[in-house]
Amino acid sequence: MISSAAVCNLSSGYADIATLAANSAQYTDSTVQPSKTYYYTVSSVAKNGTRFTSAPLTVTTSASGAPPTATTTAASNISPNAATSNGNADPNGLVTTAYFQYGKTTAYGSTSASQSAGSGTTPVSVSANLGALTASTTYHYRAVASNSLGTSYGADMSFTTGASSALPAATTLAATGVTTNRATVER
């Protein structure tokens, strides 16, 4: 018959951190910090005074923070063959990367290079230069942010590249068979 039990946090020394009633089945340690590993043992004392101690139990707490948030904003520097996609990424306290998905449909198909959004708690501006685009074409894009707790996708937005500034080539050849009411032009 057990008369009492104690929990010992080996991470902070070997002192008992709680004494539990004989019928208690759990203990919550509210002194732990995020992203740290703790080692615990549980000891029980029989009515005759004999102490029984468990093997150490390892517990690693989860990271603080939250999944990131991504926001897509208007594209800029739109030309016939390139554009700059823009957005914001809020790391929510964890190391976060951001990039853009883009393509001719909302299936996207292409991604920009990944960039660091830091580990702060406020949104940061992110952008990517998108090159090798086709003139006079509508492209869809969205910002994406990712950290250890998840990935967030900004809203879909679109832009249309400008018309090509290249003029078509034309060659005029000499006319033949010129009469008062007729001429033949060869191509």
Image (cartoon, rainbow, N blue to C red):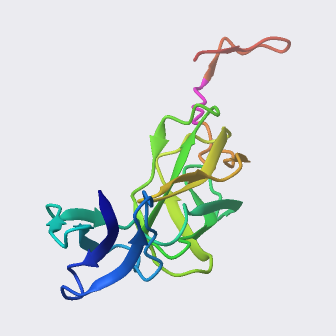
- Where residue 88 sits in the image (x, y, percent)? 62, 68
Residue at figure coordinates x 22%, y 63% from the top left: 58
Residue at figure coordinates x 40%, y 79% from the top left: 32
Main secondary structure type of the part rendered in magenta: loop
- Is residue 182 toward the left or the right of residue 108 in the image? right
- Is residue 136 toward the left or the right of residue 92 in the image? right
Report if residue 170 lies within the magenta region.
yes
- Where residue 55 sits in the image (x, y, percent)? 14, 61
Q: Which residues are magenta?
A: 169-174
Report if residue 66 lies within the magenta region.
no
- Where residue 19 sits in the image (x, y, percent)? 38, 77
Extreme residue in the front direction: 48
Residue at figure coordinates x 61%, y 37% from the top left: 168
Check the picture and name the quadrant holding the C terminus. Answer: top right
Position of residue 174 relative to residue 127, above or below, is: above
Q: Does residue 128 show up?
A: yes
- Where residue 47 sits in the image (x, y, percent)? 26, 67
Q: Does residue 95 show up?
A: no
The answer to which of 137 and 91 lies nearer the viewer is 91
Q: Quadrant of residue 183?
A: top right
Residue at figure coordinates x 63%, y 56% from the top left: 79
Position of residue 119 relative to residue 171, above or below, is: below
